[in-house]
Amino acid sequence: MKLPPCLTRRLLCATCDKTALDRKVLHLCRCFREVNKCLSSCPCRKPPHDKKCKK
């Protein structure tokens, strides 16, 4: 049984969009990693303090 052309077009669009979306997400992840790296190595930031309970 053959699928209707409108359904095959929609399936093709859905799979094509998914790969493009995956590429965009990977690119964003890389950008966030780079920003995080830059922020963590910034000398103007104070190091986090360990807050321990003193008894």
Image (cartoon, rainbow, N blue to C red):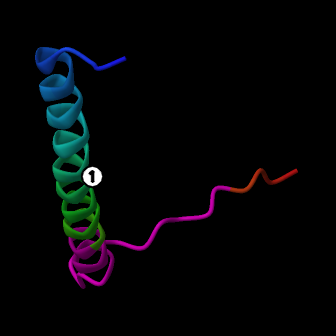
Q: What type is the residue that disc 1 sits on?
A: Asp
- For the point 14% across and 34% down, the residue is 13
In reply to whether residue 48 is colored magenta, the answer given is yes
**Screen quadrant of the N terminus:** top left
Residue depicted at x 53% and y 65%: 49
Residue depicted at x 42% and y 73%:
47
* Residue situated in front as seen by the camera: 8 or 28: 8
Q: Which residues are magenta?
A: 34-51
Of residue 14 and residue 41, the one placed in the foreground of this image is 14
**Magenta-drawn stretch, dominant element (helix, strand or loop):** loop
- Badge 1 marks a residue whose secondary structure is helix
Residue 31 against residue 43 in the figure, above or below: above
Q: Which residue is mark 1?
A: 22
Residue 1, placed above or below residue 18: above
Q: Position of residue 26 (x, y in %)?
A: 27, 61
x then y, percent, for residue 11 = 24, 29
Q: Residue furthest front?
A: 1
Q: Is residue 41 magenta?
A: yes
- In this rendering, position of residue 15 left or right of residue 48: left
Q: Quadrant of residue 33?
A: bottom left
In this rendering, the count of numbered labels is 1
User: Looking at the picture, how far across and down is residue 30, in whole percent?
Assistant: 26, 69
Residue projecting furthest to the right: 55
Rendered residue at 18%/45% (across/down): 16
Give neighbour class at mark 1: few <14, some 14-19, many 20+ (Cα, 10 Å).
few
Dividing the picture into quadrants, the one containing residue 46 is bottom left
Q: Using the rendered view, name the quadrant where residue 50 is placed.
A: bottom right
Q: Which of these two is toward me, 39 or 19?
A: 19
